[in-house]
Amino acid sequence: MKQSIIEKKSRESNIELLRILAIIMIILHHITIHCVNVQLGDKSLHKVGELFNNFTFYKKLLLSQTFMPIGKIGNIIFILITGYFLIDRPINILKQFKKLISQLLFIVPILVIASYIYFKFKSPSFTGLINFYLFNSDYWFIGFYMGIILVAHLFLNNFLHKLDKKQYSIFLIVMFSIISIDYLRNTIAGISSNLVTLFAGVFIYSFGGFIKIYNPFKNIRTIHFISIIILSFIAIWISFYINTINNINNAKAHNSIEFYQSLNALGEYSIFCILIATGLFELFKRIKIPNNKVINYVASSTFMIYLVHDNNFIRKVWNSKDWINIYYYNLPKFIILHLKWIAIIVLSGIVVYSLYLLFLKILKTDFIKKMLFVKSIEQHNQ
């Protein structure tokens, strides 16, 4: 009872609104990285010299370059929120894992059936059919998130609570250095590339906890965070421009007749992603809005929204559309297509999450409990 009261109090609608923004950012990122960026370099779709595939820097591509890192920013936001709320409370690791795994178990058969229906009635040549192996594959973020929670449960929270402010700050600086400096990061990547991401996650979780305990940005004005976000995106755009020009000049220097545009990817360890995520977190933390049940409910469904869209079925459906042609000739339509898919994915996720809650409620009914209990006794007696 005590724990449930704490959980209800932690439902701050301003932070829940940030969760919703974060999942929208992740959807935009996945459309960009799995469709737009892939189709930009697909020789079977567009020949050399057509559309974006020539020795020119296209300002229009800055829009998609903006979408490239925001999924990573969304990931960072989720981990920051987790660290912020879990740093000063005991972690119920069983409850955390059961919540994630049960939703995954619920969504997999739904996606298997949905992909088959799409194949059967929409596209007989569809290659995005998925099977039940989806449970053990894809969805890297689940493992990333669970790994961070496990580390926090086993020792990280206890370790951080033993540190004073100065020691905590030194720990954050050391962790940030490890994930930021190329040599140190590559040394860890030599063991496992996934370990670098986990290190970044531990740093971000710890940083979220530091914000909760010490509120280090309380004297920094809101305009400064807005400026940091804007300047970070400007740095991303300038870097994209420079990389594109370098790629064009290298292609020309080698007398290449082929040049395919590509967008720049960033990781959770990117300084710009961390700065933007921190800025957004602090901005939303300062928003004063009354507790809103609708916002809280939608926010509670964000994990299911993630599961609904981040799989090969949805990616193949997305890729059935020629995004590049629309992008090149009709930018407003290109933007509307993004908004359309955001709406479809979010609404689908909310519906599936509602069915999931209903399913859990049915399982807890006395009739089902008695039926399962009787069945288990019969099996035991046999």
Image: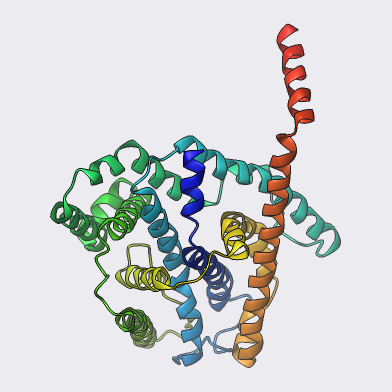
In the image as oriented, which residue stretches furthest toward the left? 166
Q: Is residue 141 above or below residue 155?
A: below
Residue lying at 66% horizontally and 59% vertically, measured from the top left: 349
Question: What colour scheme was applied to this rendering of the protein?
Answer: rainbow
Q: Is residue 352 left or right of residue 195?
A: right
Which of 375 and 288 lies nearest the eye of the viewer?
288
Which of 99 and 286 lies nearest the eye of the viewer?
286
In the image as oriented, which residue stretches furthest toward the top? 381
Q: Position of residue 152 (x, y in %)?
A: 35, 43
Which of 318 and 297 lies nearest the eye of the viewer?
297
Q: So how many labels did they put on this image? A: 0
Residue lying at 46% horizontally and 85% vertically, measured from the top left: 62
Image quarter of the C terminus: top right
Q: Is residue 377 above or below residue 172?
A: above
Q: Is residue 219 left or right of residue 18?
A: left
Q: Position of residue 178 (x, y in %)?
A: 22, 56
On the image, which quarter does residue 28 sit in? bottom right
Please indicate, yes or no, whether residue 143 appears anywhere in the rendered image. Answer: no
Please indicate, yes or no, whether residue 172 appears anywhere in the rendered image. Answer: yes
Q: Position of residue 303 (x, y in %)?
A: 57, 55
Q: Is residue 6 above or below residue 368?
A: below
Q: Is residue 321 above or below residue 326?
A: above
Q: Position of residue 287 (x, y in %)?
A: 44, 73
Residue lying at 33% horizontally and 84% vertically, measured from the top left: 223
Q: Is residue 101 left or right of residue 286?
A: right
